[in-house]
Amino acid sequence: MIKSLKGTEDILPPESGLWHYLEGVARDIFTKYGYKEIRTPVIESTPLFIRGIGKDTDIVQKQIYSFLDQGGRSICLRPEETASAVRAYIQHHLYKTEGFVKLFYIGPMYRGEKPQAGRQREFTHIGVEIIGSYSAYADGESIILLDDLLKAMSVKDYKFKVNTLGCQKDKERFKRQLKELLKFQINRFCRDCQRRYKSNVLRILDCKNETCRKALHSLKLSNDHLCDDCKANFREVLDVINKENINYELDPFLVRGLDYYTKTVFEVISPGLGAQDAIAAGGRYDELVSELGGPKTGACGFAIGFERLLSVIKQGELKYNPPAPTLFIITMNEKARRAAFNLQHQLRKKGISCDMDYQNKSLKAQMRYADKTKAKFAAVIGDDELKNEEVSLKDMKTGEQKRAKFNQLADQLPSTENLPAGRLKTDN
């Protein structure tokens, strides 16, 4: 038997319905905030991510799925979306036609990591990119938007971690200070961190090794590497989110795992996930557009790890109720089935969600199945009903029954023209 590849998963009903529901919640909120969807190719040129993310990051060093195509070009499965969105912004000259854009995306990403709960090799990101602004209000909006989104998805017990890396010059000063702090302690760190000490010392702050984490937190980090402008910018960002009562804490060790970040960086953590507790992250990347060949302009954004988000939601009291059909048609014989088949298509054209039996089940079995689907109504068609071109209509909640003509049935049923993708509710 051929199985799915390790690190990938099939999303089956009703789980797929939950995905659809949450994606719909995200689209609604993004639209409310004025964001428009971007869809970029799953395959990209490998140098896009080497230049954008950084050659010394774990993503490029260990995780990227990169290979040569038939033409000898190095291509890869995208490991994240920000570099792709910026590439599209430059390639399609949006900096000329639009200048400032607010984009959102929902799609699969790929990293060759060790599969674990909430972290697969094929995973989904939901995120936004604000390109064309240096304003602290853009940073603030991305954090406030993310907070709104998590609340709308019924996520609880989460907290933001926020930090600033400063501008590119500040980051260089920070690297020098960190090297000095670690100079006599680097042997306490893992081999990867010892390599990072020479190639890109900031990556040590993003190490997930527990021994390294403990050694790091013994250091006394300060923000004296920040210039006055970056200090003022960060104060303004914090002022914006303070007015919205965002639950956050300052974390001087937070740098994120991508080299393109400057100034504001943030993560959302959930205690229910264990050591890998981040469900979303983002920040500002003012150098990335120009680094990839575009104009010098500010940008920021965030991404939610969708599978981790689902893990948090499933740990809570909320359960997903998939959408139920309005009507289930039960038939007594072959002639009735033929009539029911035609009738349901007429009802669907009028916006009524309906279904019927396709397995020639007994009357009793059909009734049980109608109850299993949680249909609001059941319509029975037998010989008597066929003669009069009517159904025996039963309200599955109240048990009330009445007769309804085929051509009048739609008027007696609630329309589901805009059928919702289910809903979240508590068990009680």
Image (spheres, rainbow, N blue to C red):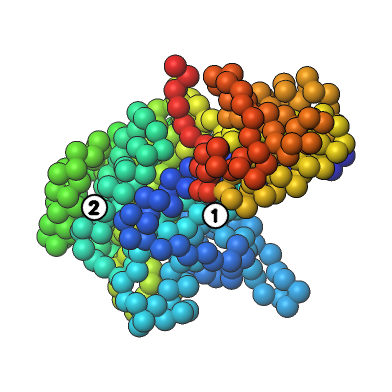
Is residue 309 shown left or right of residue 231? right
Q: Residue furthest front?
A: 388
Q: Which mark is residue 140?
A: 2
User: Residue 329: x, y in percent?
Assistant: 71, 34
- The answer to which image quadrant residue 412 occupies is top right
Q: Secondary structure at mark 2?
A: helix
How far apart are labels 1 and 2 at the CA level? Answer: 24 Å
Is residue 279 shown left or right of residue 43? left
Q: Residue at x 24, y 66 (%)?
A: 134
- Residue type marked 2: Gly
Q: In the rendered image, is residue 421 in sight?
A: no
- Residue type marked 1: Gly
138 relative to 242, above or below: below
Residue pointed to by mark 1: 107
User: Residue 262: x, y in percent?
Assistant: 30, 59
Q: Secondary structure at mark 1?
A: strand
- The answer to which image quadrant residue 10 occupies is top right
| Front residue of this view, candidates 328 and 63 | 328
Q: Residue at x 86, y 32 (%)?
A: 333
User: Residue 39: x, y in percent?
Assistant: 52, 64
Contact between labelled residues 2 and 1, with CB atoms less than 8 Å apart: no
Of the image marks 1 and 2, the number of the one nearer the N terminus: 1
51 relative to 243, above or below: below
